[in-house]
């Protein structure tokens, strides 16, 4: 096989194969880098806060889209008087207390639930509803599914859901809720912000570019296989011819 491989015809074949291997390697590397670039760009895009109404198909009738869960969002409007409720039995750093959920009415008239934060009790001054136009930056979260349908207890709900809030406030609300991370302008005293329960949503993996990368590398490996296989067959033929002579 070695003697045959060093003949001019097979040396040319080896050079062509080597060129194809190099080309396939760099084409595969290009597709791999493109895969990573697509992931980085899409993750950067969903990490950039957008107006909450842009990620809701219909802010009242449609459910929260799966791709919107964990999305950083902003919402601008005024907190609605009489549209606030406490969520019972929510601890912070092992201290008992409650969450404060207030409806923020946008300029389009949509009532968006905002989890403003934690307070140690219902009489805390931080429960006062700010009377200013604010812009809230936060993370969009889905309805809490545990204790679904549970009735309010002592004017407090046990889980945040579109159904529970609509029942308490007597009007339609947007699906999900925004966990406040910051607010402009600040309006002290304010509840202590709480971390979102669901991380920032990820993006679909670009499988097409990923498989394209491996296709090129498999093509290079297959070229080597064919070369060796072809060389072995030709060497066996020459050996057989020599023995028959």
Image (spheres, rainbow, N blue to C red):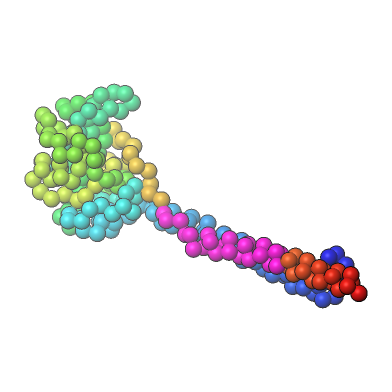
**Closer to the camera, 68 or 109?**
68
**Closer to the camera, 59 or 127?**
59
**Closer to the camera, 149 or 46?**
149
**Closer to the camera, 189 or 207?**
207
Q: Name the quarter where the C terminus is drawn.
A: bottom right
Count of numbered labels shown in the rendering: 0
Q: Work out which residue is located at the far right of the displayed protein and give it.
A: 245
Q: Name the quarter where the N terminus is drawn.
A: bottom right
Name which quarter of the figure residue 218 lies in: bottom right
Name which quarter of the figure residue 166 lies in: top left
Q: Work out which residue is located at the far front of the displayed protein and give it.
A: 244
Stretch in magenta = 203-226
Q: Work out which residue is located at the far left of the displayed protein and give it.
A: 170
- Magenta stretch: residue 82 in it? no
* Residue found 42% across the figure and 56% down from its top: 204
* Residue found 21% across the figure and 49% down from its top: 175
* Residue found 16% across the figure and 49% down from its top: 173
Residue 96 on image: x %, y %: 25, 24
Residue 155 on image: x %, y %: 11, 32
Q: Work out which residue is located at the far top of the displayed protein and give it.
A: 95
Name which quarter of the figure residue 183 lies in: top left
């Amino acid at each position: 096989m070695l003697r045959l491989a060093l003949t001019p015809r097979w040396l040319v074949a080896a050079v062509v194969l080597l060129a194809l291997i190099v080309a396939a390697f760099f084409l595969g590397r290009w597709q791999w880098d493109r895969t990573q670039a697509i992931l980085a760009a899409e993750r950067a895009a969903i990490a950039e806060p957008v107006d909450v109404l842009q990620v809701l198909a219909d802010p009242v009738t449609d459910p929260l889209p799966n791709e919107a869960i964990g999305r950083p969002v902003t919402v601008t409007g005024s907190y609605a008087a009489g549209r606030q409720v406490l969520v019972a039995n929510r601890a912070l750093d092992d201290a008992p207390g409650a969450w404060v959920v207030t409806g923020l009415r946008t300029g389009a008239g949509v009532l968006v639930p905002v989890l403003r934060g934690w307070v140690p009790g219902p009489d805390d001054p931080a429960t006062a509803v700010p009377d200013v136009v604010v812009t809230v930056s936060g993370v969009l979260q889905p309805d809490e599914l545990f204790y679904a349908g549970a009735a309010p207890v002592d004017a407090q709900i046990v889980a945040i859901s579109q159904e529970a809030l609509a029942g308490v406030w007597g009007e339609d609300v947007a699906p999900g809720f925004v966990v406040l991370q910051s607010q402009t302008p600040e309006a002290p005293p304010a509840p202590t912000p709480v971390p979102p329960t669901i991380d920032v949503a990820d993006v679909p993996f670009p499988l097409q570019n990923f498989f394209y990368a491996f296709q090129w590398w498999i093509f290079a490996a297959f070229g080597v296989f064919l070369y060796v296989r072809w060389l072995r067959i030709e060497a066996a033929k020459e050996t057989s011819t020599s023995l028959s002579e």
